[in-house]
């Protein structure tokens, strides 16, 4: 039994020194010790920005830092060989790896083509011009640095739906290529949100579909990753990813875990999408992120009873990947909506200790963002430890209040020392009278996070727990520490005995 934790293994402003794959490889065992069970790797594919591209401006899906293209062999994070070694080391440490698949668009074409295209209003993509006009568009991808290695597929205008640049017409609009149409099963923002950026890949074209299916199989075999984080799914035909995942799972005979990024605070849109893809993937709980952000930024005005309302965690808990922040919400990025530092420990306490959701910890929170002077969330390692040791059993609300939020985890006999009380506030703290349960009667709960005094549970199973102003408190059974110290000691003793035994065998041999 284990309580999984995903780590988003990067933030936007990592140094572009080509050493990230090697760093992750070196840290693999340390990550496992911290309780991380899966790691979302940044896009390994070569972007139009070459060695400086974060990876979302994808140029060549088959160049993972192996070919001299876009000014360098390596990507921002290292070479293809280093990527594969990193995946291997993470697997050896018992950590699942998730590749970031960016299939919506292409950037940095090798050349232009003369085509005909229709202007489209970027603010209302259903406002499409009548007459096609001559257009010069960046849609020719020949990958001269790679040649035909891994795939001979050549991308040209017939593979794309639209672009946002026409060399023959300076109008600032989108250009729908002649004979193409928007996919209808995409997000409805701007009328139709098929187009995001660059050259929009026409995933409904049969040749493109075949090629992307082929790429998925190649990627799994070539890199041995366990699954995918799917970028920008609200801009891609839902039927495409539904079929792509099914085909990939059938062909590889593997589980192929997948989580999609559908950036939309409206939970109904997420639920609709899950239906459209036959629940073939999890989704990030974007509504919950916005609730956490609001609770942190509204100066105590936010009603904490709303925190879990209309979130994916509440409505489709089996498909919810919970997170506090990510590479897009961090300061300076496109979707900046950073959860304020003072509320971070509370936010992580919620996603790591609650029963529902698969929590994803952000690199920028675990290690800080030095380029912005943002420090690490110091409580995170302890919260991750508490998740593993204590966050078990049924969950009941600890308090019903507009400024206090909290819950009790009842623990399970299968995990000795498990159970906890979690409290947080977005305003004034205080003391809450909480029912922990008869099973804990007479036991002492230690405050592991929050700096409060220990609490003895009454014979009726109730006790008073405190939380500081604007703070969070996590109380765990005193028992936990004893159990885990004992376990650590016996493991160390066994290891020592094994080592001594090993030496003896060697000497005798
Ligand atoms: Ca698209």
Image: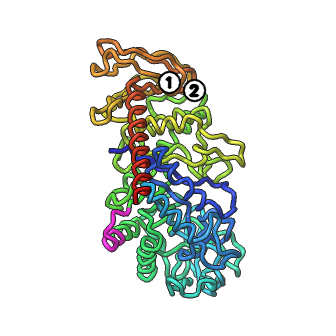
| Vertical arrangement, residue 341 with respect to residue 187, above or below | above
Q: Residue furthest top?
A: 459
Judged from the image, the secondary structure of the residue bearing numbered disc 1 is loop
Name the quadrant of the C terminus: bottom left
Q: Position of residue 499 (x, y in %)?
A: 43, 49
Q: Position of residue 287 (x, y in %)?
A: 47, 44
Q: Does residue 305 show up?
A: yes
Q: Which residues are magenta?
A: 247-256
Crowding near pointer 1: few (<14 within 10 Å), some, many (20+)?
Answer: many
Q: Please report whichever mark, 2 or 1, sits nearer to the chain's N-terminal start.
A: 2
| Vertical arrangement, residue 344 with respect to residue 47, above or below | above
- Which residue is rendered at x = 28% and y = 36% of the image? 414
From the image, tell me which residue sits under label 2: 300
Check if mark 2's residue and mark 1's residue have beta carbons within 8 Å: yes
Q: CA distance from mark 2 to mark 1?
A: 7 Å
Q: Please tell me in which quadrant of the rendered image residue 433 appears.
A: top left
Q: Position of residue 412 (x, y in %)?
A: 29, 33
Q: Position of residue 311 (x, y in %)?
A: 42, 42
**The one of 90 and 278 positioned closer to us in this rendering:** 90
- Which residue is rendered at x = 61% and y = 53% of the image? 11
Q: Is residue 442 magenta?
A: no
**The one of 40 and 102 positioned closer to us in this rendering:** 40
**The one of 241 and 6 positioned closer to us in this rendering:** 6
Q: Which mark is residue 363?
A: none
Label 2 within 8 A of ligand 1 by Cβ: no
From the image, tell me which residue sits under label 1: 403
Q: Is residue 255 magenta?
A: yes
| Vertical arrangement, residue 31 with respect to residue 434, above or below | below
- Which residue is rendered at x = 55% and y = 47% of the image? 362
Label the magenta part by its dominant secondary structure. helix
**The one of 154 and 436 positioned closer to us in this rendering:** 436
């Amino acid at each position: 039994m284990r309580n999984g934790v995903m780590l988003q293994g990067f933030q936007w402003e990592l140094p572009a020194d080509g050493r990230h794959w090697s760093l992750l490889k070196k840290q693999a065992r340390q990550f496992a010790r911290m309780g991380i069970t899966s790691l979302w790797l940044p896009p390994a594919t070569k972007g139009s920005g070459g060695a400086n591209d974060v990876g979302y401006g994808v140029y060549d899906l088959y160049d993972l830092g192996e070919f001299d293209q876009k000014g360098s062999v390596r990507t921002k994070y290292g070479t293809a060989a280093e990527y594969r070694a990193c995946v291997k080391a993470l697997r050896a440490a018992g950590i699942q790896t998730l590749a970031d698949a960016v299939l919506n668009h292409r950037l940095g074409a090798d050349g232009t083509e003369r085509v005909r295209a229709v202007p489209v209003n970027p603010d209302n993509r259903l406002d499409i011009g009548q007459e096609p006009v001559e257009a010069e568009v960046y849609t020719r991808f020949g990958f001269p640095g790679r040649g035909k290695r891994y795939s001979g597929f050549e991308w040209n205008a017939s593979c794309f739906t639209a672009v946002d640049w026409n060399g023959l017409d300076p109008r600032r609009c989108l250009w729908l290529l002649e004979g193409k149409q928007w996919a209808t099963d995409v997000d409805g923002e701007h009328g139709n949100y098929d187009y995001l950026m660059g050259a929009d890949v026409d995933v409904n074209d049969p040749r493109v579909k075949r090629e992307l299916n082929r790429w998925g199989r190649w990627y799994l075999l070539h890199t041995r990753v366990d699954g995918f984080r799917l970028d920008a799914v609200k801009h891609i035909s839902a039927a495409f990813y539904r079929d792509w995942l099914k085909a990939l799972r059938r062909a590889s005979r593997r589980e192929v875990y997948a989580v999609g990024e559908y950036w939309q605070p409206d939970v109904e849109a997420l639920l609709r999408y899950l239906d459209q893809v036959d629940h073939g993937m999890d989704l990030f709980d974007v509504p919950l992120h916005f609730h956490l952000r609001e609770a942190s930024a509204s100066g105590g005005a936010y009603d904490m009873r709303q925190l879990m309302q209309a979130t994916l965690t509440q409505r489709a808990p089996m498909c919810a990947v919970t997170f506090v922040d990510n590479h897009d919400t961090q300061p300076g990025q496109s979707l900046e909506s950073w959860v304020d530092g003072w509320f971070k420990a509370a936010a992580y306490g919620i996603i790591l200790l609650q029963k529902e959701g698969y929590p994803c910890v952000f690199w920028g929170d675990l290690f800080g963002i030095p380029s912005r002077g943002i420090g690490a969330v110091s409580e995170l390692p302890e919260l991750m430890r508490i998740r593993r040791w204590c966050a078990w059993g049924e969950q009941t609300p600890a308090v019903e209040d507009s400024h206090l939020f909290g819950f009790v985890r009842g623990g399970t006999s299968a995990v000795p020392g498990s159970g906890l009380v979690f409290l947080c506030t977005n305003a004034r703290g205080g003391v809450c009278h909480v029912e922990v349960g008869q099973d804990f009667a007479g036991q002492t709960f230690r405050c592991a996070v929050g700096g409060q005094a220990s609490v003895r549970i009454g014979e009726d199973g109730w006790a008073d727990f405190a939380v500081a102003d604007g703070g969070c408190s996590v109380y765990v059974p005193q028992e936990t520490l004893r159990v885990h110290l004992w376990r650590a000691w016996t493991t160390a003793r066994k290891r020592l005995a094994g080592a001594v035994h090993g030496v003896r065998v060697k000497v005798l041999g």
